[in-house]
Amino acid sequence: MPLTSNNVLPQPEPPPQPDVNRLFPVFLKLEQLHVLLVGGGAVGFEKLSAMLANSPAAAITVVATWFSAELQLLAERHPAVQLREQPYHPTDLVGHDLVIVATNDKELNLRIKADATRQRLLCNVADTPAACDFYLGSIVQKGDLKIAISTNGKSPTIAKRLREMLTHTLPDELHDVLQRMAQIREKVGGDFAHKVKSLNAVTAELTGGPAYESPAAARWRKIATASLLAFAAMLVFNILSYYFTWQQVWAVASSSQTFYLFVAIGFGAQLIDGLLGMGYGVVTAISLMTLNISPAAVSSSIHTAEMFASGASGYHHYRFGNVNKKLFKVLLIPGVLGAILGAFLLSKFGETYGSYVRPFLAVYLLLLGIRIISKAFSKPGPRKKHKKLGFLAAAGGFLDSFGGGGWGPLVTSTLIAGGRTPQYVIGSVSVTEFFVTFASALTFFATIGISHWQIILGLIVGGIAAAPFAARLAGRIPTRWMFVGVGLMVIVWSLWSLRKLFL
């Protein structure tokens, strides 16, 4: 190999770059520009619809020899759109910033492209990627969040499918996240480097990192956690010391195989409940009745143990970011009041009247479970806004106490069937469930007392152990299979309740 004049080997040429997407993505303020659209048929209507869906006040001039009825109707709803029923002429380009060509005449399309290039205007020619200066990508929008998808003109169908998938997968709550992020950015002081560091900490949880907490929030979280643990310890201590000595407790916990069976039941029930937002009462009731435990003991044990398990589950759902605080606040007070009323009436009038409620709830939930499973395999539709969430929470709390269960199956399944994101529904309902079961258990404790502490203690230990695993998995399972799981759990619950009508 020859040497250069400086006796240095010549540098090898860089390897050729692969043919990849080299488009530079931008987001245009289309309402500050003037757009010329040539073509009034189906393709022209598609292009006009896409632009107006993102920029409703955009100034768009449409030139064509005829206009479809759909395009004319769309133009009537947007005053900034002008229709010119005439053949294209190069003078139509004057005063415009962008040109979009959508006629069915390929020669005309290329001529318009050449005219636009001579006037240094960016031009998009429908179905002709080689003649395009830019592409109109598929758009995914969640409030202020907007994602544009490009396949470099190779496959609009793939871009469309990706748009449908992301629209279904990304939660609607992302819009609220962006609003809060804007407020945080305004409040964060210091120089640019400090702001970047603070915002990085806030968004770390979105990528699986540790969640951001302000010092005040962290302090109150520690106080709340310590208070919850202290209350739990005090209540367990009082119950056990009232009925049994500590020597008896240790003997049962260290030697009784039945105790560990209750722990296993509590673990499995809480794992399902924390994962799907329902099922604790169903799993524990079926399991305990299989062991020939009396229904009265089953009911009192479940309500007491579920208070501790739901508290642990709600804490971990909050920690992993599965809680919609607005939804939690709406459900809290009505759910607690409904639980107190149901527990009080059941303690006074017995389970005779409570048995009349279960068949109606079971039939409703059977149909709802089938609907949820069918929704998992259907195309996503518009989300329905529930206007009576307080009534729903009150009914769920009442039926949970008075009918022996129903908070999760009724509230969670109804919200999910309405199109809300399962992860946030399950987390929010699980946090609220702690306060609902606490109110119910406290009412039962004040009216009929608590017994069968061996069952309660086993369920508590198993439920608390399962809570962090269930909360972590709630955000990792695909939405479709969460719908299937919730639907199957609702159907199982309803069939379990309906069996009493035929036995």
Image (spheres, rainbow, N blue to C red):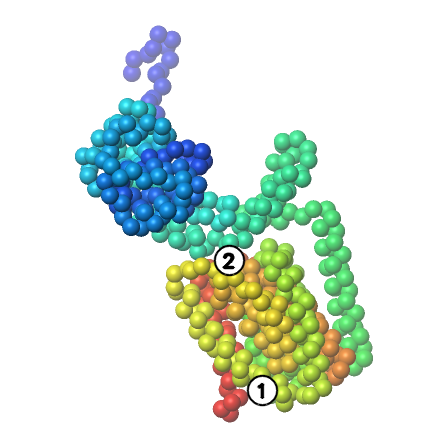
Amino acid type, callout 2 = Arg
Residue at 74% over, 54% down: 220
Looking at this view, name the residue that lies furthest to the bottom. 503
Q: Is residue 380 above or below residue 290?
A: above
**Image mark for residue 356:** 1
Residue at 34% over, 21% down: 12
Q: Is residue 151 left or right of residue 127?
A: right
Q: Is residue 91 above or below residue 80?
A: above
Q: Please tell me how crowded label 2 is: few (under 14), some (14-19), or many (20+) other residues with Cα within 10 Å.
A: few
**Image mark for residue 476:** 2
**Residue 81 pos. (x, y %):** 37, 40
Instruction: Give whichever of 332, 253 is nearer the camera.
Output: 332
Instruction: Give whichever of 234, 335 is nearer the camera.
Output: 335
Give the mark, 2 or 1, whose residue is nearer the N terminus.
Answer: 1
Q: Is residue 239 visible?
A: yes
**Image mark for residue 166:** none
The part of the image, by quadrant, that contains residue 200 is top right
Q: Please tell me how crowded label 1 is: few (under 14), some (14-19), or many (20+) other residues with Cα within 10 Å.
A: few
Residue at 52% over, 62% down: 385
Residue at 33% over, 27% down: 94
Instruction: Give whichever of 426, 100 is nearer the camera.
Output: 100
Instruction: Give whichever of 264, 162 is nearer the camera.
Output: 162
